[in-house]
Amino acid sequence: MFELIEEQITNFKKIVFVTGAGISQESGIPTFRGKDGLWRNHDAMKLATIDAFYDNPKLVWEWYNERRMNIFQAQPNAGHKAIAELEKYTQVVVLTQNIDGLHQKSGSSNVLELHGSIVQIKCTVCNFKEEILEEFFDLPPICKCGNILRPDVVWFGESLPQDVWQNAMNFSSKCDLMVIAGTSLVVSPANTLPIYAKQNNATLVEINPEITEMSGEMDLSIRNTSAEILPQLVSLFKKSYD
Ligand code: APR
């Protein structure tokens, strides 16, 4: 299964991981699409929009409150840990669409959060921004300035933080191996990152139990879960470097 990687292993000096909700699925965090994508019969895709928030901030906050509590008690799984361990052998950058902080919790040091962080809360009007781990009881929570607070995440209809996105494109354009794990690759612009890597002739590897929109572009597609496959992938590096 890994022959393609084993043959070139010592050439892979700059590795970029592009991750999505699937990598945290085995930590008990539901994905967005497919059977997991419903919360109290609301479509997660519709709740995660700037319009839904302004239409009904209380409802959207109830969803985030529940997700925050679930995420705060979640632990990194073998997939997150394997990526963190790979830093011992080569340069690793993680470009994640996840807002759960599990890559950082597992020890990865170069993580770019493309869609923000669920821990961080910001004001919809003033400059207030802070990491808050406590549960909010009166929803929506209100800033000292009198306006509504919101999670510092990127919703549909909003742009990615420009500095983060610029760096993500740069790392992707320079990598020699890109591993895409646990993402359906349907959300733009994150789903363009493999194209930047391909333009640099990087090897593209996808780890996903399901076929994705970009499976046809991959050099290798492994149809299995990330907690199963990533430790196996990292053990190839271990074998080669130790
Ligand atoms: N291991 C690997 N992949 C998995 C696993 C697993 N254990 N379980 C599920 N998957 C795959 C699914 O097959 C699917 O392709 O993970 C993918 C999850 O896809 P989405 O739910 O669409 O999540 P993601 O790609 O991260 O969504 C992108 O959309 O809603 C927005 O901002 C939100 O960041 C999110 C973005």
Image: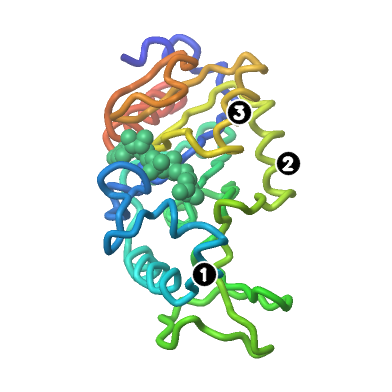
Determine the residue positioned at 46% across, 31% down.
180
User: Given this view, does label 2 or label 3 mark the residue nearer the observer?
Assistant: 2
Residue 14 is tagged as 3
Determine the residue positioned at 35% across, 43% down.
33
Element under label 1? helix
In percent of width and height, residue 150 lies at 56, 72
Is residue 65 shown to the viewer in this render? Answer: yes
Q: Pick the quarter of the image with the N terminus.
A: top left
In this view, the residue in front, 229 or 129, is 129
Q: Residue furthest front?
A: 55
User: Of label 2 and label 3, which has the lower sequence position?
Assistant: 3
Quadrant of residue 144 within the rendered picture: bottom right
Q: Ligand 1: which quarter?
A: top left
Residue 129 is tagged as none
Question: Are circles 1 and 3 on residues that touch, CB within 8 Å?
Answer: no
- What is the C-alpha distance between the residues marked 2 and 1? 32 Å
- What is the C-alpha distance between the residues marked 2 and 3? 17 Å
Q: Which residue is mark 1?
A: 55
Is residue 85 shown to the viewer in this render? Answer: no
In this view, the residue in front, 179 or 148, is 148
In percent of width and height, residue 122 lies at 62, 73
Element under label 2? helix
Looking at numbered disc 2 in the image, what kind of residue is underneath it?
Gln
Looking at numbered disc 3 in the image, what kind of residue is underneath it?
Lys
Question: How did the renderer colour the structure?
Answer: rainbow
